[in-house]
Image: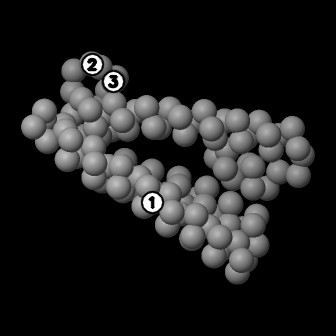
Amino acid sequence: MATIVFGISRYFPLSLAMLFILGVCDNISVVVRSTLVQTATPDDMRGRVSALNGLFIGTSNELGAFESGTVAALFGPVFSVVTGGLGTIAVAAITAWLSPSLRKYGRLGGEH
């Protein structure tokens, strides 16, 4: 939602606040994903899973930047940012729907 608000905002303090919220949420996401990889992966597979996870994260960032730049060039930056935010919400909802065990994971560090 913060991405969408940032995309349509014309008020600098609001845009800055949305970027701050995006940064905070991204940092939380990195910590949660890193913690899950470390705690939910069997010891003998942890190095391989961590390497593959790093590869996918790096690749997805590059592909995402390419996709966003292409959409911005074709349709404008506001459209690119807003549809990117909508796409993120859609992917999160679909992932939650398709992965009920992930939804029920609970607190990090707790029983899973």
- For the C terminus, the image quarter is top left
Residues at marks 1 and 2, CA–CA distance in whole angstroms: 29 Å
Q: Position of residue 27 (x, y in %)?
A: 53, 34
Q: Residue 101 falls in which quadrant of the image?
A: top left
Contact flag, marks 3 and 1 (Cβ < 8 Å): no
Judging depth in this view, the residue of 25 and 44 nearest the camera is: 44
SS at badge 3: loop
Q: Earlier in the sequence, mark 1 or mark 2?
A: 1
Q: Residues within 10 Å of mark 3 (few under 14, many from 20)?
A: few
Judging depth in this view, the residue of 60 and 25 nearest the camera is: 60
Q: Amino acid at mark 3?
A: Leu
Q: Amino acid at mark 2?
A: Gly
SS at badge 1: helix
Q: Residue 105 falls in which quadrant of the image?
A: top left
Q: Amino acid at mark 1?
A: Ser
Q: Position of residue 104 (x, y in %)?
A: 29, 33
For mark 1, what is the residue?
60
For mark 3, what is the residue?
108
**Nearer to us: label 1 or label 2:** 1
Contact flag, marks 3 and 2 (Cβ < 8 Å): yes
